[in-house]
Image (cartoon, rainbow, N blue to C red):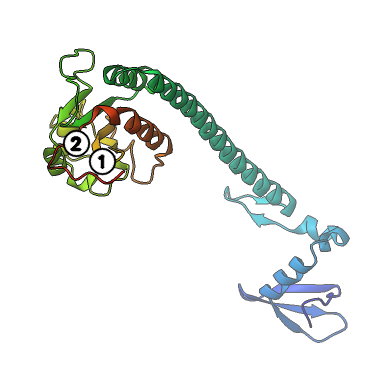
């Protein structure tokens, strides 16, 4: 018998889990595998339209221990798939909404930075945006020595921005700064203390993970860091499109206020 053969009325006697024996009225007993039956039904999806009485007698074990018809089982599978698709679609909508909000905050920040007339104004607007719009747990701006303006005397930004030695920064953050790329992930105690100036042994109110972005435009100018108390919030596989864009704009705006030390190698323009 081929896969496409139509079996006459026969009594099916189950012998093993993988093979069945068919006793036809007008032929000798023949054996076919369950795989052949399954393939035949796949090749003839309309088979049960002509054999509804067979369909009515089919029963499939259900997870509850009861028996359900094939149609009911198919409906159940389709319902589960529909729920899964709706959940995926809801997650896509949620991600799109978050990205739309993130884009609007980023656009607002960039416009405010471009309109700033001084380094202090740039820093103040950056801090205000992170705290009020993006609502981050912690943020810091570290500018390497060579900055032409003293920013330490401004109380509004004293906990957000400061001038640091470039060699000290590379020593404390060597694993982060070596690649000149944005880095997301958990922080070690030394890194969290250097970037945000705080760390508690019990982990409460301590920055557990962060996005760290080098500021680079015709030379290394500093570091922009955004921290979260949740050590799992920033992960290594997170996208950094928006924050990298902000850092590129910020680097170009603060470049006129940076004079690179003689010991610092500055790439050609």
Residue beneath disc 2: 260
Q: Which tag, 1 or 2, sits closer to the chain's start?
A: 1
Element marked by disc 2: loop
Which residue is pictured at 63% across the width and 49% down the height?
66
Q: Is residue 57 visible?
A: yes
Image quadrant occupied by the C terminus? top left
Farthest residue toward the bottom? Answer: 28
Do the residues under discs 1 and 2 have CB atoms within 8 angstroms?
yes
Name the image quarter holding residue 256: top left
Name the spot of residue 93 as percent of width and height, x first: 57, 33
Residue 193's place in the image compared with 3, above or below, is: above
What residue is at 41 percent from the left and 41 percent from the top?
239
- Residue hosting label 1: 219
- Looking at the figure, which quarter contains the N terminus? bottom right
Question: Looking at the image, which is closer to me, 160 or 72?
Answer: 160
Residue at x-position 57% and y-position 50%: 63
Real-space CA distance between mark 1 and mark 2, rounded to the nearest whole angstrom: 8 Å
Left/right of residue 209 with respect to residue 74 in the rendered view: left
Closer to the camera in the image, 49 or 198 = 198
In-image side of 98 versus 225 (left or right): right
């Amino acid at each position: 018998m081929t896969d496409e053969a139509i079996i006459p009325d026969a009594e099916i006697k189950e012998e093993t889990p993988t093979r069945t024996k068919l006793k036809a009225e007008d032929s000798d007993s023949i054996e076919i595998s369950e795989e052949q039956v399954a393939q035949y039904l796949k090749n003839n999806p309309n088979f049960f339209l002509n054999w509804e009485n067979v369909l009515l007698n089919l029963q499939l074990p259900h997870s509850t221990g009861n028996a359900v018809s094939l149609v009911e089982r198919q409906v159940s599978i389709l319902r589960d798939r529909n729920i899964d698709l709706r959940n995926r679609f809801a997650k896509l909508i949620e991600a799109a909404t978050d990205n739309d909000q993130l884009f609007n905050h980023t656009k607002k920040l960039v416009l405010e930075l471009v309109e700033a007339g001084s380094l202090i104004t740039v820093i103040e607007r950056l801090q205000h945006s992170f705290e009020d719009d993006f609502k981050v747990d912690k943020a810091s701006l570290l500018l390497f020595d060579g900055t032409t303006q003293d920013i330490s005397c401004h109380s509004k930004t004293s906990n957000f921005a400061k001038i640091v030695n470039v060699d000290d920064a590379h020593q404390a953050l060597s694993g982060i700064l070596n690649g000149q790329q944005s880095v997301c992930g958990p922080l070690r105690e030394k890194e969290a203390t250097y970037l945000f100036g705080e760390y508690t042994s019990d982990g409460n109110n301590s920055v557990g993970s962060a996005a760290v972005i080098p500021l680079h435009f015709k030379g290394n100018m500093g570091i922009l860091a955004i921290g979260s108390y949740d050590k799992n919030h920033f992960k290594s596989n997170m996208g950094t499109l928006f924050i990298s864009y902000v850092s590129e704009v910020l680097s170009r705006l603060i470049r006129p206020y940076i004079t690179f030390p003689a010991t610092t190698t500055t790439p050609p323009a």
